[in-house]
Image (spheres, rainbow, N blue to C red):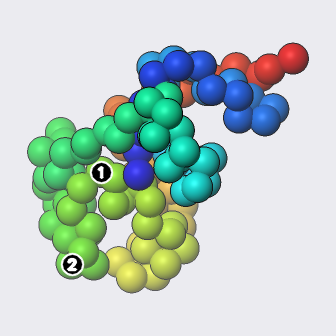
Amino acid sequence: MLYRALADLDAGKRVIRKGCVFLGKELGESVCDALLQRGRIAVVSTPPLIVLPNWTIRAELLRTVGIVTVEQFLEFDTDELAKAIERTLEKVNEWKKEVKAQFVIDNRRRSG
């Protein structure tokens, strides 16, 4: 899932700053569940890939493997996805980087 930090979060060697949007796998499911209960993070709803500029063809391709939303795309294992849609790992990583640039705000800083 994608989350927005509602307060600065200590993530070990990094701080996830208030307002940052991040992938839950960065912290782990149990940590995210606890932070949700404490009101420190909120779930971010993502749009269908097909509404992204210049993503119609890619969205249709990804739909063939059950991926419809930005969140599903970012969370899907990259190696498995590349094989499933018969694209290179580099191409899938490029697409993920493009989507992350639009949705994942990375304003983390190193702590210490």
Residue 95, image x, y percentages: 40, 52
Residue at (44%, 30%) from the top-left corner? 39
| Horizontal side of residue 50 vs 7, given as left or right | left
In this rendering, is residue 29 above or below 10? below
Q: Relative to residue 17, is residue 70 depicted above or below? A: below
Question: Which residue is disc 2 drawn over?
Answer: 64
Inspect the image, locate mark 2, and give the three-letter code of the amino acid beneath it: Thr
111 shown above or below 3: above
- Pointer 1: what residue? 70
x, y percent for residue 100:
43, 40
Q: Is residue 34 above or below residue 91?
A: above
Residue displayed at 63% across by 26% down: 9
Measure how far apart labels 1 and 2 are at the Cα level: 15 Å
The amino acid on which the numbered mark 1 sits, given as a three-letter code, is Val
Give the total number of marks visible in the rendering: 2
Res. 109 mark: none
- Residue 73 visible in the picture: yes
Residue 61 in sight from this viewpoint: no
